[in-house]
Amino acid sequence: MQPVEYQPPLTRWSHAWRLILVLAVSALAWWELAPWQLENSPWWFAVDVVLGLASLGLVFWRRAHPVAVAAVVNALTAVSASAGGPATLALMSLATRRRWREIIPVGVLTVVAGTVLEAMNPVSTEALGLTVPFILVIVATTIGWGMFLGSRRELLATLRARAETAESDQAVRVAQARTFERTRIAREMHDVLAHRISLVTMHAGALSYRDDLAPDQVRRTADVIQENSHQAMVELREVLGILREDPGDAAPELPQPSASDLPALVEEARSAGMRVQMRSNVSLDLLPDTLGRTLYRVVQEGLTNVRKHAPETVVSVDLDGSENRGLRVHVLNPLPIGDRRGATESGLGLIGLIERAELIGGRLEHRITPEREFVLEAWLPWPT
């Protein structure tokens, strides 16, 4: 992380207390020398004041040019005691960057400048052998405190960035959850309603085109339409109830179709006029719930597609598998001769099936063979 990223903005109060501290340090460093300068060397006093004010102005640029400001201001302390406060602030601000290639040269310059001023100080009674260690301690303390502040600022900035990232990730997860839920709703609605509505459409079409039906045949067809319409509404309410799950509750509520409902699904298709051949070498009652539910949806979607696009053809449903090999589903029907109009080829059902199969670790494919046969194949893992 670059320093400019974790340097906090300064408020008016931040500027105020720093200015007060700078003036206090300058006064402490200059209070012995200033009277002597004023009495014995007025020009040095004037130069000291000018350089001190210049240093005070330069420190307001310490964040834009940290190395240059710290170097210039601390170099001025060689002849100006009143620049001690700004020099301390500039050195500490530089140390918050925690870059030794910048700190060490400026720190050495600060020690040298302080030693020069102390050697020129006519009111100093201490020997340089005692003053230089004191200057080293002051410089080391200033640098150490600045590095501590920089480390703390970076830590706070890192924690703030992590919190913002966590909030952003949470927003992304919420959006993904919404998208997933919408996709799930569309998939469930398609699986439940497409099967029933296709039956209603086929029987209603027969009533539209057949004008030679006897009254009892019309009545039976109307009963089928009414029964399937009612059943569609019932299943729709069941799906909406399933989708209203509590957070974290992934288990769907009953009733849900299972593999044992496949024979009834095939018989229902046959009673609607479809020619369905089903072969199976697996015991449907032994299939786990998740596998059985996915198998039911695959076969249901296959029969629905045949009913919509090729109702006059013969559809074959083959089931084969075991716990070691998994379950293979094969739904095949010849394509109709000529162009059949009126069927909407949305593909949503097949997309939903692919998602269902992948969610349990399986796969699903569909293709048209050279013999003009539509094949729907799925492999589903059979958990032990």
Image (cartoon, rainbow, N blue to C red):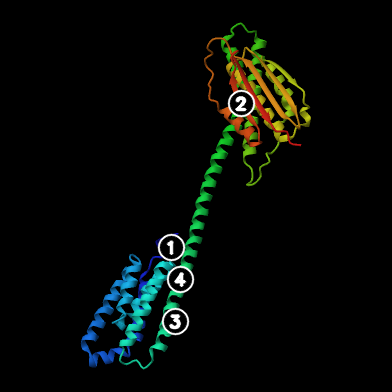
Q: Residues within 10 Å of mark 2 (few under 14, many from 20)?
A: few
Q: Amino acid at mark 2?
A: Glu
- Give the x, y percent position of residue 223: 66, 18
Q: Amino acid at mark 1?
A: Tyr
Mark sitting earlier along the chain (3/2): 3
Can residue 255 be seen in the rendering of this structure?
no
Q: Helix, strand or loop at disc 3?
A: helix
The residue identified by callout 1 is 6
Mark sitting earlier along the chain (3/4): 3
Mark sitting earlier along the chain (2/4): 4
**Residue 365, numbered circle:** 2
Query: Residue at (37%, 72%) from the top-left corner?
Result: 106
Q: Nearer the viewer, mark 3 or mark 4?
A: 3
The residue identified by callout 4 is 147
Mark sitting earlier along the chain (1/2): 1
| Residue toward you, 194 or 105 | 105
| Residue toward you, 104 or 381 | 104
